[in-house]
Structure formats: C-alpha cells, structure tokens
Image: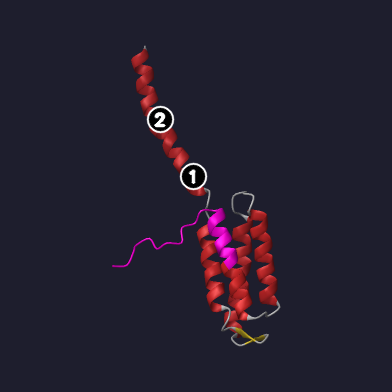
Amino acid sequence: MIAPIRFLAWLLLPALMSCSFNLLAATAEGAPQALHLLDYIGADYPPTVEAGKVIDESEYREQVEFLGVLQGLVAELPQRPERAELVKGVDELLAAVSAHQDGATVARQARQLGAKLAVAYEVSQAPAITPD
C-alpha cells in the first residue's frame, strides 16, 4: 500500500513544481516592457523638446502614447508595496512631458523610475548575452 502512494507522490511532485515555476515567472510580467519604455523615453525625450518647445512633433506624440501604455503596464503589475509609488511616478513623468519640461529633467525622472521598477520587480538590466 505504501509503494503506490510513494509512486503517486513522485508523479505529483514534478507537476506541482512546474505549476509553481509558472506562478513565479508571471510575477514580473509587464515589468521588463515598462522598463524598456522608460529607457526609451529617457533617451529620446531630450532631443524632442528644447526650451519648452516641441522640436519633433511626431516623436513627441509617440512618447506621449508610450507613456499611456506605460501607465497601463505599471497599473497591472502584481501588487507590491512599491507599486503605488511607481504609479505616482509615471503620472508625474507624464505631467512633465505634457508640460514640455527640460529634457535633462525628464530623462532623470525616467532613469530614477526605471531603477525603482527594476529593484521592486527584480528586472535584470544585464544583457542576456555578454559581448566577446
């Protein structure tokens, strides 16, 4: 009687473990995409707006659109204590972009927000493949 129970346990254990790995992998879903958008905005905003004037209208509209996507991604992240601060930070970043604030200021905000996101949701910022 003990042998069939052990056999059943050995069959169920890998199945349960595979389910738990899927749950662990899903905890940061959306975080890498959000981090990528923050990096993009931080890099591309400064040449788009100078002295409160939009230089490249299509690029500016694209960044505002990406900030809307970013708001959705951050709002849908798994609940963690840092999420409320991240949501507030994205709202402040959108307000700064909408107000045509200085490029260096917006880039700094985006980098700081990206760093907080990476720590809160354990997003690796190292390349998957190291250069030779």
Which residue extends farthest left? 132
Closer to the chain start, of discs 1 and 2, is 2
Q: Is residue 119 left or right of residue 127?
A: right
Dot label at residue 7: none
Q: Is residue 69 above or below residue 103?
A: above
Which residue extends farthest top? 1
Image quadrant where residue 44 sits: bottom right
For label 1, the SS is helix
The amino acid on which the numbered mark 1 sits, given as a three-letter code, is Leu
What kind of colouring is applied to the model shown? Answer: secondary structure
Q: Is residue 4 above or below residue 65?
A: above
The residue labelled by disc 2 is 13
The CA span between labels 1 and 2 is 17 Å
Q: Nearer the viewer, residue 87 or 75?
A: 87
- Quadrant containing the C terminus in the rendered view: bottom left
Which region of the structure is painted magenta? 112-132
Q: Is residue 10 above or below residue 103?
A: above
Q: Position of residue 56 (x, y in %)?
A: 59, 86
Q: Is residue 131 left or right of residue 54?
A: left
Any magenta on residue 120? yes
- Quadrant containing the N terminus in the rendered view: top left
Q: Nearer the viewer, residue 58 or 83?
A: 83
Residue at 61% across, 88% down: 55
Q: Position of residue 120 (x, y in %)?
A: 57, 54
Figure disc tally? 2
Any magenta on residue 38? no
Dot label at residue 24: 1
Q: Nearer the viewer, residue 66 or 96?
A: 96
Q: Position of residue 127 (x, y in %)?
A: 40, 63
